[in-house]
Image (tube, grey):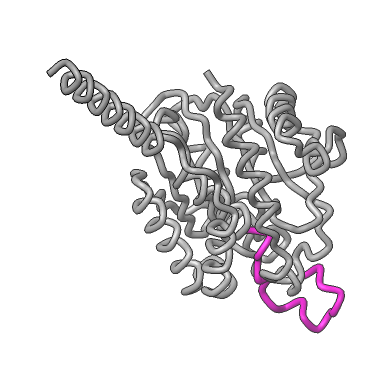
Amino acid sequence: MKRNIILVILVSVFVLTSCQNRMAITSAPAAFDSDRAYQDAVSQMNFGPRVPGSTAHESALEYIQSQLEAAGWQVEIQNVTYKDQPVQNITAKKSDTDRPVILAAHYDSRLLADQDPDTTLRSQPVPGANDGASGVAVLLEIARVLPAENKNVWLVFFDSEDQGNIPGWDWLYGSEAYAEALSVDPEAVVVIDMIGDSGLNIYREKSSTRSLVDEIWASAAALGYSNEFINEEKYTMLDDQTPFLNKGIPAVDIIDFDYPYWHTTSDTIDKISPTSLEVVGKTLLTWLKTMK
């Protein structure tokens, strides 16, 4: 009889331990999947150039929205006319907060490949693999794997960032319209742009909030990514962080501007590296863990 009681206790302990292990495995956050992120870039590229007003642009918006909703995010579309152009910004959130941490990228691609070495191609649109699709891909994968406790994180996808020096346009329409309409006070805004090329070299951008740069670059170094996140200043960029800095909001631009296919017809999917997407995605996820 005593042996049977001991056997029951041992079986109960085994079952309880197994259940706890299964619960731990189930609740553990998923890892950043570089292949899945890369497929997000491929899917965007399959629509064609996502220039404002095009069918491809609308398809990209619908794709981003569907992926975010499938990952359990609430999605809001800001539809405005800004400087005589329609703008559609996308915000994904888990909850409302007065102090969000915003991770952002632009999803439009450029109307004209005006930096193409072949002058006959400069009237063509930019395919926008690195300059547009890469940042969106990283944010979509973060949307899938971000731990549930990060409820103060918003993911924002800006429209019409990349149309400057084109008649009827200027730079940053999406982020300017978004910043002007803000009714909250973000704790930080982190913009990622052109972060998917295989030879990833991200320098500290000079206009960015230094404390944020220090934190993010420290997170990258802790992961062994110091070769990709280079601890030196190089460029001052007019990018989607600028409207927030102008409002006194801490902001940083994570960008590899040493990309030889910038604003050319060669900005194609073969230039994108899943490894680079992972480097940036894991760095941001690690940095978010340090936010209080």
Left/right placement of residue 111 relative to residue 183 reads right
The residue segment tinted magenta is 114-132
Res. 113 image quadrant: bottom right
Kindly identify the residue that appears in the image at 40 percent across and 37 percent down: 25
Was residue 125 drawn as part of the magenta stretch in this picture?
yes
Q: Nearer the viewer, residue 221 or 31?
A: 31
Q: Residue furthest bottom?
A: 120
Residue 75 place in picture, x, y as percent = 36, 47
Left/right placement of residue 79 relative to residue 169 reads left
Kindly identify the residue that appears in the image at 81 percent across and 68 percent down: 115
Q: Residue furthest top?
A: 2
Kindly identify the residue that appears in the image at 67 percent across and 38 percent down: 242
Prevailing secondary structure of the magenta residues: loop
Res. 248 image quadrant: top right
Res. 104 image quadrant: top right
Residue 220 place in picture, x, y as percent = 72, 34
Q: Nearer the viewer, residue 254 or 247?
A: 254
Was residue 126 drawn as part of the magenta stretch in this picture?
yes
Residue 216 place in picture, x, y as percent = 69, 30
Relative vertical location of residue 138 with respect to residue 247 in this rendering, above or below: below
**Quarter of the image where the N terminus is located:** top left
Residue 264 place in picture, x, y as percent = 76, 70
